[in-house]
Amino acid sequence: MDAILFENAISDAEFSPESMACLPDICWKIPQEELEARKDLRNVLTFTIDPSTAFDLDDAISIETLSGGIVRIGVHIADVSYFVHPETALDAEARSRSTSVYTLRRKISMLPSRLSEELVSLNPGVDRLAFSIIWDIDSHGTIISRWIGRSIIFSCCKLSYDLVQDLICSDASQSRSAVSSLQVHGIFEREDVIKSLACLYAVSKNLKEIRFKGGALSLDTAKLMILFDDAGAPCDSYRYVRNDACFIVEELMLLANMSAAEVISNAFPDCALLRRHPEPNLRKFREFEAFCAKNGFELDASSSGQLHLSLSRIKEKLQDDPVLFEILTFYVTKQMQSAEYFCTGDMIRRKDDWAHYALSIPLYTHFTSPLRRYPDIIVHRTLNAVIEAEQVYLKQKKSSTGQNGVKAASYEMDRCFTGLQFSKDAAESEEGRKALSAAAKKFKVPSSENLGEVAAHCNERKWAGRRAEEAGQKLYMWALIKNKEIVACNARVLGLGPRFMSVYVPKLAMERRIYYDEVEGLSVEWLECTGTLVLDAWRNKPTQRRGPQVKCRAIEEVVMLVNPSESMLSEEDEESGVTEAGGCTAKSVLLSDDAVNAQSAPAVLPLVIHYLSDIPVVLHATGGEDSAVDIGVRLYMSSYFK
């Protein structure tokens, strides 16, 4: 793992003394001036929803029921920018790291744990500084009002995804039983939490429906998770499946990020840090459309919305073949380009390219995770500047109109820069321009040139972190398979030819190739006109060689042959086979050994293979020591030639 981190230039060193000196003591208390300057939300029902193992809680959710069917929803983000000041050692180190990296057994944090887990973590039962976005939403999911600003919150409890899932899927008596051990702080009771979750669930479903009607695309691909024993060694694996509780949080975080993007890009069109998702490669998509047409599926990839509708119809059609739909989703994901941060000033003449393809929205950024993403800190500083400029501008207008004998109450209520209706006239007025310029200097909003460099660095670090996380997962899976020696499972054929086949292994959510040309003792017959491959073991006939220098491989490199009278695995081995599971976070139900091994019977030679055939394979660990680790796939077959 150290080699993987080194290869991706990821440092796991302790934070420097200079960085740590930027933080207050652990006994720090919120200053009185902050209590007076911020919106006090401590008496509003607020809680966090996170994985049960989380310690750095950077987002909380609040809910209030108003009259007329209006619900007031708040997203509250840890105010990291209050502690991480520009041009300090801590800011420089956070910028250098740019992102937290998670490698299953290790977390390389962007910020010191004293800050991320103690000073700003939105732990229950304590007052915390937050950056809040609050919406009033009607029963149809329409947003009718928005407030953005700095606040003080009090989280009454820490909820896990699994507990929330239990609560929203249970009746009243079961819900009360599920939260019987939940500790609730402050003025609210467990019953208040249960009721609020039901309301949140309804609101999030409305928001999600509106989002997908607007053309959003969802690509939920299988994610492999690994379990570890008490000694820290990988011992099992399962498939991670997101549930409705995850989507409640996701919808609200997306809404907060979209709101932040709208505000900062309107106020600072030359120096806002946004996140774009380019359209997929059209040439590759034409190949995928041909792939679908070949298999009888209609696919419209003219837009993200049409693509989502096409995939929904295909999913309905493939209810009895979820693996094939997983493969199609896997293919679509491969055609997508990576999302990236950018400075609006660098693309000021290409505003159409600011859009986020998958979300089907014109503006997007990252605001909700400042504990693990440096761009979010930049966005917080920019939002602070917008709020400051708005307050200064409205104060000046109040003074001006007051001198003329006109009531100024409307200006106090009007959120000209942060509300739903951005006032371009106010921003472009002399007072507005001066207020925005002064606020940008006060909060050290980066210039367009500097912000472009920050965006490029954050992109590079994010991609490096992703490579490290994927390589770490592969390493642990390699170790798991190596310890088990052999893991049998099914694969689906994605491509066939005279030399090799491409297969998708659902157990690992990965694609691999099996080369079968020039194999001693293996008869290969490729019927191109029908796209059929016939494999057989032929001990008595020498393999046809293409040239005198070609060296044939042993059949054992390509095929694991077992005699029908023998059992491949002992009973003990079968009981320790890799299993699959579904569920959100740590609470997962593993499938029984029978359910897994029932799909692991060897095929009988001769074997006839077509496109999209199911074939049994065995996984094995390759490499190690002086060579790169990898996971190989061999055919799993039964023959009396063995």
Image (cartoon, rainbow, N blue to C red):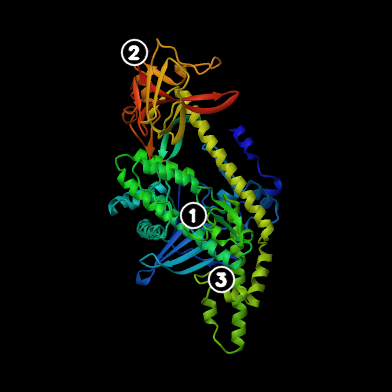
Secondary structure beneath disc 2?
A: loop
Q: Quadrant of residue 408?
A: bottom right
Q: Amino acid at mark 3?
A: Phe
Q: Is residue 239 above or below residue 164?
A: above
Q: Nearer the viewer, mark 2 or mark 3?
A: 2
- Residue with the mark numbered 1: 357
Name the residue nearer the viewer: 183 or 141: 141
- Mark earlier in primary sequence (1, 3): 1
Secondary structure beneath disc 3?
A: loop
Q: Amino acid at mark 2?
A: Tyr
The quadrant the C terminus occupies is top left
Task: Report whether residue 406 is seen.
Answer: yes
Q: Position of residue 316 (x, y in %)?
A: 31, 47
Name the residue nearer the viewer: 90 or 22: 90
- Mark earlier in primary sequence (1, 2): 1
- Residue with the mark numbered 3: 417
Residue displayed at 50% across by 68% down: 147
Residue displayed at 61% across by 59% down: 347
Residue displayed at 56% across by 71% down: 417
3D distance between C-alphas at marks 1 and 3: 26 Å
Q: Position of residue 540 (x, y in %)?
A: 40, 10
Task: Report whether residue 23 is seen.
Answer: no
Name the residue nearer the viewer: 497 or 5: 497
Q: Of the numbered discs in the image, which one, if any, rests on residue 640?
A: 2
The crowding category of the residue bearing disc 3, from other C-alpha atoms within 10 Å (few below 14, some 14 to 19, many at least 20), is many
The crowding category of the residue bearing disc 1, from other C-alpha atoms within 10 Å (few below 14, some 14 to 19, many at least 20), is many
3D distance between C-alphas at marks 2 and 3: 78 Å
